[in-house]
Amino acid sequence: MAGLALVVDARPYVVATRRASSIVLPSICFTFAIVLAWGLIPALAVQVAAIAVAAARMRRPVRRTLHLMGQHAVALAAAALVAAIAGLGASAATGLDPGLSGGGSTWAEALWTVVAAVAWMAARYGLAALVAHVMSPQRAPRARRWSVELFATAALLLLGPVVLAAAEGGPALVPLVLLALHAVHRMVRSAGESERATRVDALTGLPNRRALHASMAAGLVPHRRLALLLLDIDRFRTVNDALGHALGDRLLVEVAQRLAGVVPPHDLVVRLGGDEFAVLATRVDGPAAARRIAGHLAEALGRPFALEGMAVDVSASIGIAMAERGGDGAALLRQAEVAMYDAKQRGDQVAVYGPDALHHSPDRLTLLADLRRALESDAGDDGITLFYQPQIAVATGAVVGVEALLRWHHPVRGLVGPEELIRVAERTPVMRLLTSRVLGEVIAQLGAWQAVGRPVRASVNVSVRDLHAGDIADRIEHLLELYAVPPSMLQLEITESALMADPHRVLNTITRLDRMGIAISLDDFGTGYSSFQHLRRLPLSEVKIDRSFVLGMATDPGDAAIVHSVITLAGALGLRVVAEGVEDERTWRLLAAAGCHAAQGWFHARPMPADDLAIWWSRYRPIHPAPVP
């Protein structure tokens, strides 16, 4: 048995992909049998020798080897104590003989053998848990690893009495237990492969999002400082569409290999999904060091990738979030994502999340968390409502459309306006939840208006995040079919900042929406960095002049000149023009003289809930603008 213990430990069982200390030694099957039959000293000697063989095979450090020996020594001592109390010993080696026919003593010995195995496991893993807690108090135990390891250990220990029973029949039968050991080995290996499959990205072979969360949970302890760098490949969808999905996948694999090549072994490279990657840096002393790491990553991606004889240039926007004195991994990932979108919006390659930014304050993060809970709640009274503001044809005074405006009555803060809501949620995953909620309610309301004979076009604001997701067209198509609403009754508004952040990536989405018959409006025109080329190429139906120009056009010649220029340009391109912020009659008349198509503002009506809008609509009488004096 001692010889077999040394032989089988030349191939110890490694549980999943964990640290080298997380192993199961098959020799415990034989040393447990030895401790039952011949006592602690022989079992301890054989176990120490077997661990030495396993340590040499796996090249384990001396400190970890001594730690493993200590665990097994305590475990064998606990089993020997139970065996002494129960009176097991030589009779156990030869003594399953009196009770094979069903004697009471055999059942008692079997029960005490199980108790000895439980004592062995409690002593070993109790000591291991105690040492782990002392070394890393904040590290949570990994339940799945322990379940596999405990099951394999129990199976090996309970094979010990079987080995003794086989020895009673003759020494030649003892090696047959190797077949059972092989079965346990296959079970552990299968569990490890299953565990790896859930933590590894199938395309690139990098760890996935789940592995990142596990690593952050293990690394976010008070005495360590981490940095999470989130990378989003710029214009990847354009490359994917131009070269095909096969070469797009190859590009992702090449990017993964290049990132893994420049990141040191003590850091973690992860593919989060799509064209997003992350690097968890575990040895940083501040934002400056994290920026240096980001610079190395950007430099590595700056070299062209060779695909099918073509040189493909790739760049990435990188967001950095720092974690100090513990923290929450999910919050760290959200902060890195916010920083990444900041970098994209500003045109910078790297941005660091900082608490000094307006939308980064803890107060706004709390508001964001409250908004998410409200959107995910099944309760009907969550405070989120939609107001509608009419859009009036300047020439005829007819109602030609409405704009849906979001309002949220926070249970503590009171009414939260749309500007603050968008500022808080726009660069986070909550924005998609918000857009889905708004689209669902607006299209349902369009169906209700159509049913009572008041068909009208409704405009809904969408963010760059919604357009980057790509599935917004599918969601809208489903809702239009569900409520039997024609696509021409829905219009989506995008801002200049959303358009200019990544026009090529946005183009694919809005082109599909245009083909579905959904109008696209360019909101807040004149406040961003519009390119006339994009204005000409994009499938736009409407341009909205920002209220900052409309409010002053009656008194400021510069604002008036800008409004006239936009109306002339849009008319030449065949686009409708809507003026926002019309609050007095003189401005309305000036817009009519300039040839503006529609006006929106408090001069005609304030934003109001759908029920109030129906009452206003029934009382409204079109008015025509008089000539400007």
Image (cartoon, rainbow, N blue to C red):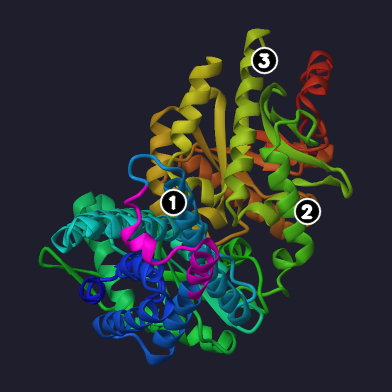
Q: Label 3 is placed on what type of residue?
A: Trp
Near-viewer residue (472 or 219): 219
Q: Are marks 2 and 3 in contact (CB under 8 Å)?
A: no
Q: For mark 1, what is the residue?
A: 110
> Label 3 neighbourhood size at 10 Å, few (<14), some (14-19), many (20+)?
some
Mark number displayed over residue 552: 2
Quadrant assignment for the N terminus: bottom left
Is the residue 544 above or below the residue 212 in the image? above
Q: Residues within 10 Å of mark 1 (few under 14, many from 20)?
A: some
Of callouts 3 and 1, the N-terminal one: 1
Location of residue 366 by image quarter: bottom right
Q: Of residues 422 and 575, which is closer to you in this image?
A: 422
Who is closer to the viewer here, 114 or 585?
114
| Element assignment for label 3 | helix
Q: Position of residue 424 (x, y in %)?
A: 70, 56
Q: For numbered disc 1, what is the local secondary structure?
A: helix
Please report whichever mark, 2 or 3, sits nearer to the chain's N-terminal start: 3
C-alpha separation, residue under disc 1 versus residue under disc 2: 94 Å
Circle 3 is placed at which residue position? Answer: 449
Q: Is residue 128 left or right of residue 177?
A: right
Q: How many marks?
A: 3
Of labels 3 and 1, the one closer to you: 1
